[in-house]
Amino acid sequence: MEQTDFDGIVFADTLQDFNALRYARQTVHILCCCGNMGFTFQDTRYNIAVGDYVILPNAELGSGFSASDNFRGILMSLSEAFVASIAIRSNYGIIGHLSLLQNPVMKLSARDFRICEAALLYLRMRMEEKEHLFREELLGSLLTAHILDLYDIHARSRDTSQLSEHIASQLRKFIELLYNGEYMRNRDLDFYASRLCITPHYLSEICRKVSGRPATYWIDRFTIQEITRLLRQKELPLTTIAERMNFSSVSYFSRYVQKRIGMPPSEYRNNLTSKQFKF
């Protein structure tokens, strides 16, 4: 693993080293250069090959990483604080973020693969210059350039336009509320709209404009993500999970899960070892 006193960016060479990088709220980038790699993201199994670029907006959302014997890739972990500090002047970030929460894999053209590989290798090389007087600013600039290239690749594949500052700001605040665990206490659309000082209809419309999904989809997605994580802990009784997620009863909790993943929580738990479910 790359050892450096700069903790904003860390690179890994192997899957074993990579597993040590997956801290809470870290953003993980993986460029597959040879072989294959698999992982589970929000109950969906992904298998990537050469030319695939994976971005996990939150490292906690990924699990079950495995790789072929000949796997070779560039694996990078970015701290939330460092990403925030570079302050990219583009509202496209929230578009990409919501899209990656639905599918974290980008298929690169040969040209885009070469651009991304060169950028990551150069960034890693410049990290070695520990005596550089403006090292943090230098690395921030190089990372900014790479992220803007990723925005361009993503936007070209979806023909997506830019957002106004107001819409981008509202969506960032909404998603931040969900990342902070507000869905464990509040799953009512009116609550989030009230916190943002906008109407429920407007919140759903701006979510739909950016992601193709209404706001309730994202509230449910974060909720189900946490519920399925808890269900994997088989020592936790359903009553405990229902209470932790602030459901009024186990029966209400079971109906909620049944409606959204197509089976009651007990059945989901029984099928964990044999099947993957896509929400």
Image (cartoon, rainbow, N blue to C red):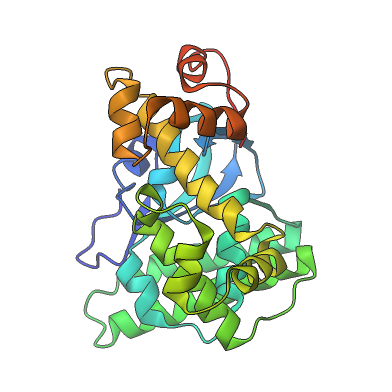
Left or right: 31 as drawn, with respect to 81: right
Foreground residue among 210 and 254:
254
Whole-percent x and y of residue 204?
A: 63, 65
The residue at the point 46 percent across, 76 percent down is: 196
The residue at the point 45 percent across, 64 percent down is: 191
Q: Is residue 153 visible?
A: no
Whole-percent x and y of residue 228?
A: 44, 31
Left or right: 196 as drawn, with respect to 8: right
Q: Is residue 254 visible?
A: yes
In the picture shown, does residue 54 fall above or below 244?
Answer: below
Left or right: 192 as drawn, with respect to 203: left
Whole-percent x and y of residue 45?
A: 58, 31
In the picture shown, does residue 259 fall above or below 104?
Answer: above
Total marks shown come to 0
Residue found at the very far right of the displayed protein: 159
Residue 246 lies in quadrant: top left
Q: Quadrant of the C terminus?
A: top right
Foreground residue among 99 and 55:
99
The residue at the point 50 percent across, 70 percent down is: 193
Foreground residue among 208 and 185:
185
Whole-percent x and y of residue 237?
A: 30, 20
